[in-house]
Amino acid sequence: MGWLWAIIVGFVLGLIAKAIIPGKQHSPLWLTTICGMLGAVVGNAIARAFGVESTPGIDWSRHAFQLVAAIVIVFVVDMLYMATLGKRKQTA
């Protein structure tokens, strides 16, 4: 059940990150989901480093760290994806 929640959270974080980043992102949905999952893991690590590991109620600060990490990761991975895709189209 843990993997299912990781995929769902990654999917949602990835879609929110794509919606926040200005312009069109060309990365496929599966890559966006993986980036969202990575954003959740990195955001949790950053929150733990800041001492916001667990709070009573909803962990809004932890979720904010996860979202910011997902935005950065989706942005960077989309740039790398387009650079790779662009090189493939030029050689074909």
Image (cartoon, rainbow, N blue to C red):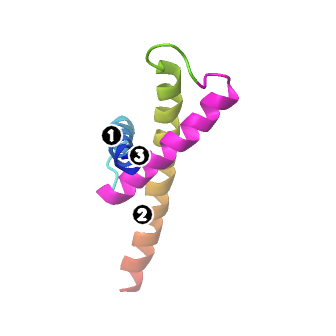
Residue 64: give its label: none
Q: Which residue is mark 2?
A: 82
Q: Which residue is mark 1?
A: 12
Q: Quadrant of residue 8?
A: top left
The kind of residue on which mark 3 rests is: Gly
Q: Which residue is mark 3?
A: 2
Say few, some or many: other residues with alpha carbon within 10 Å of mark 2 (under 14 / 14 to 19 / 20 or more): some
Task: Tell whether 18 sits left or right of 57.
Answer: left
The kind of residue on which mark 2 rests is: Met
Q: Residue at the location (64% across, 30% down)?
A: 48
Say few, some or many: other residues with alpha carbon within 10 Å of mark 1 (under 14 / 14 to 19 / 20 or more): some
Sequence-first tag of 2 and 1: 1
Q: Residue furthest top?
A: 56
Q: Secondary structure at mark 3?
A: helix
Check residue 10 for magenta coloring: no
Tell me: residue 14, above or below residue 65: below
Task: Tell whether 7 sits left or right of 49.
Answer: left
Q: Residue 9, position in %: x, y?
A: 37, 40
Q: Residue 73, position in %: x, y?
A: 50, 47
Q: Residue at the location (43% across, 55% down)?
A: 78
Characterize the magenta stretch by its predominant secondary structure. Answer: helix
Viewer-nearest of discs 2 and 1: 1
The CA distance from mark 2 to mark 3 is: 31 Å
The kind of residue on which mark 1 rests is: Val
Q: Secondary structure at mark 2?
A: helix
Span colored in magenta: 28-53
Q: Quadrant of residue 58?
A: top left
Q: Secondary structure at mark 1?
A: helix
